[in-house]
Image: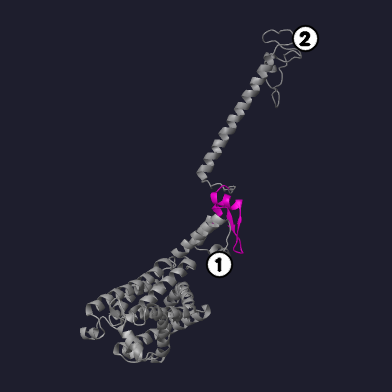
Amino acid sequence: MDTIASLFSFITWPVSWVIVQFHKLYGAVFGPDTGWAWGLSIVSLVVLIRIALIPLFVKQIKATRNMQALQPKMKAIQERYKSDKQRQSEEMMKLYKETGTNPLSSCLPILAQSPFFFALYHVLSNIASGKEIGVLNQDLVNSAREAHIFGAPIASKFMDSPEAVAALGASLTDVRIVTAIMIVLMSASQFFTQRQLMMKNVDLSVKTPYMQQQKMLMYIFPVIFAVMGINFPVGVLVYWLTTNVWTMGQQMYVINQNPTPGSKAQDSYLQRLLKSVTHHGEIRSRRHKAVVKAIVAKGSDRNENERRFIGGLAKAGFAAQADGTVVKSDAAVAEAEGTAAPKRQQPKRQSKAQRQAGGQHSKHDEADETVEETAEESAGEAAQDTQPKTSLEKKPETPAKGGTQPGGRSRASSGNRQRKGQQRPKHPSSKK
């Protein structure tokens, strides 16, 4: 570790200068030789470095999302050129170039922070040895050696010998208890940060090897830091614990305010936005308008969370517009509740047997209707015959049975309809 730290000795001067400036500030409040003054100086160094690395952190988020979106295409390329590794690499680089994705962008914050980490380790190692380094003169080195954080000198390590710890004015038990607690907190914060990213801010609809890799790192990184932590000075543990807490809080803010599409965090974000719109009746924030505008522009390509959000707006009586605003819409309510006019449905296609059975039923129904109509006509004629004649009408004479009515027509034939077709000829002997 000392050999690696010596490679970054060129940056020890600015790191030591920043620590001294913060030490002057906190030393005036807590005392120049206290652990609070030196410990808070290290914490402030971390905060200053992380603020400077925010642009790289934003690039890291974008690169991580782009890598997640490209995983299906990358998997297809690997399967297509399984036997040609060179062609596979060429297609991968072509894909990165077309989409503007840099795989190393996700590691930028760690890579950019590494020189400061090793420079701080180099400074604390020289403090433990009582040597001047950077802008730290001998007086400041002696003051830092006497500073204790919860009973442990900031330059002591978990693996130090009892003699080395006693030379710094502390006991080995206090040093190991403090360093053990810091190592556990450092590893736990690293695990929680990675778990928060995997459980809430990953598109669960896409199952790729990248997700499995991230899950493995979630368990491997804490173990690596725990093993390395026993060789870190207390001051470096303070540095690394502070940067883990900063990363966890920064990531929590990004997950809540700018979640990955398709993740659980996006579902929670859109549900909060839906409650805000329902309560206020409008979208106030410009950032929220940009989110709604992007969802409307997707159209049919929306994921499940976004479709649920649009449906929730419709049930509340709002319709999202292309400019990111919402307006009142009764049609949206009717459509969401299913009260709109139902669509005309096409009749189901019947089988040949059903059609034949239906035709027979139709014939029977027509025959029944014909019989009913004939019966009604007969009943009507009978009712007319039974109606009484008025006194002004001339009553015809009642002919004898089998006789003929006036006009030569028989009584039997008068009640029946006239026969159609050829008539039977009369017998020659019959009277005219």
The quadrant where residue 166 appears: bottom left
Q: Vertical placement of 247 versus 364: above or below?
A: below
- Any magenta on residue 271? no
Residue under circle 2? 394
Residue type beneath disc 2: Lys
Residue type beneath disc 1: Arg
Q: Locate residue 71, reporting x and y percent.
A: 44, 73
Indicate left or right for 101 with 20 as reference: right
**Quadrant of the snapshot with the C terminus:** top right
**Residue, x 34% and y 80% (percent of image)?**
34
In this orientation, does residue 239 appear? no
Residue under circle 1? 287
300 or 148: nearer the eye? 148
**Quadrant of the snapshot with the N terminus:** bottom left
Residue stretch in magenta? 313-339
In this orientation, does residue 363 appear? yes
- Any magenta on residue 327? yes
Q: Locate residue 151, reporting x and y percent.
A: 28, 77
Q: Vertical placement of 56 versus 249: above or below?
A: below
Q: Secondary structure at mark 1?
A: helix
135 or 47: nearer the eye? 135
